Image (cartoon, rainbow, N blue to C red):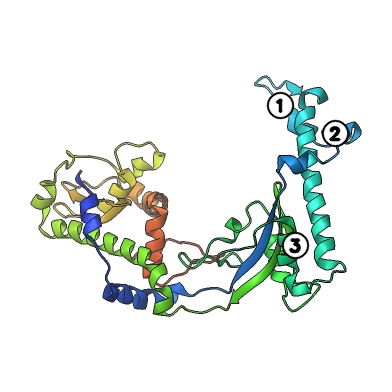
Amino acid sequence: TVKVAKFTQEKKDADAVKVDDAALRKWYEENKKSLELPERVKIRFVKYNAADPMVLAKMTVTEDEMRDRYDVTVDKYTSTDTNGVETVKKFEEVKGEIEKELRRIAVVQYFETNLNVRVYGDSPVAASARLAAVAKEDGLKVETSDWFSVDGAYQEGFMVPASRVFPGVKGFSEVVAELDPSSEDLRYGIVMSENAVWLIEKAETSPKHIPTFAEAKDAIRPRALRAAKADAFKASVEAVAKKGVKAVEAVKGVSTNITFTVADLRAGAQSFENQMAVARAAMKLKKGEVSEFTLTGPGKAILVVCEDRVAGDAAKALVLRSQVRDDLAMLQLRQIPDDWKKWNLERLGFQPGEISSVEIAEEQE
């Protein structure tokens, strides 16, 4: 039997937390290992819109091409009702949709062919200047991407995820990895999505390294501030816990007695609010004890007071103890918000990678 005191970090309290340069440098020194940057690249590019109505109108699509496309993609136009009866839309019903699709495909192929000829064919323009020349001829703007990593690594504040550079492009990382500014044959690349084509080249590269404080200062400030707010919130809750049971039970909105058995919570039904977090916090408490700070969400936490504890069936407890403990741990991990988990890993100097995983540590009996 327990009572649960809920805590929420008030906006005014969170806003009152500040991070000066000294605190920022301290956070940097404590988390420097987790800030290592992967090899990064910036891409210079020109974008062509394959959904431009004026360009689409110039493409020619024949009746035979549309019927062939319909035959190949007929599954897309097939639906099955609740009785298992299939309905297939007739060609005439989807003809307009197919025509638009084929026109868009034709535009993408047109841009790809046109750009290949202009950047790799005979030209009086120097190879190094062809992207800019093509953009000028077509009245388009040359843009430069943010930093990103070709291998998919990501470091908040220092780059963007590779998937956001050219959305919807398949094989983008492979094309970028092969770009070589010193080679006339590999200087440029062409990447495509369903609605756009990009002519690209490497603009800048940065080797793998740990950023200096000066380099990292602006990028890490939001993370350091989040950590400081979380620390301040935790400290305020722990201050109540240190005052003892009476102080915890005096918290506004503290629950009435909640009685449960841990084994019964495995069924998955929600018996009471934050039940898995409560159970996890209460498992090692003796009567009259207060739990440790337990996070339940962004800026939300609980303290649990053990009002009474009655031993259950010993044999059942022995069989279920390990299984229940692991179930509770995994369920609570799922309930912890991603931003808090990320922050906590950063504090430990851990940088998640493609094959990283979280496992439950063995507990001493």
Evaluate whether residue 131 shows in this view: yes
- Residue 170 position, x and y percent, is 70, 55
Q: Which residue is drawn at 40% across and 66% down?
A: 345
- Seen as rendered, the residue at the extreme right is 64
In the rendered structure, the answer to whether residue 4 lies left or right of residue 195 reads left
First in sequence: mark 3 vs mark 1? 1
Q: Give the mark nearest the N terminus, 2 or 1.
A: 2
Q: Which badge, 3 or 2, comes first in the chain's sequence? A: 2
Q: Which amino acid does label 3 sit on?
A: Val
Circle 1 sits on which residue? 79
**Which label is found at residue 66?**
2
Q: Which residue is drawn at 53% across and 62% down?
A: 160
Please state, as top left, top right, bottom left or bottom right, where the C terminus lies in the image.
bottom left
Q: Which amino acid does label 1 sit on?
A: Ser
Characterize the local packing of mark 2: few (<14), some (14-19) or many (20 or more) Cα atoms within 10 angstroms: many
Residue 292 in view in this figure:
no
Measured Cα–Cα span from mark 3 to mark 2: 33 Å
Q: What element carries label 2?
A: helix
| Alpha carbon separation for disc pair 3 and 1 | 46 Å
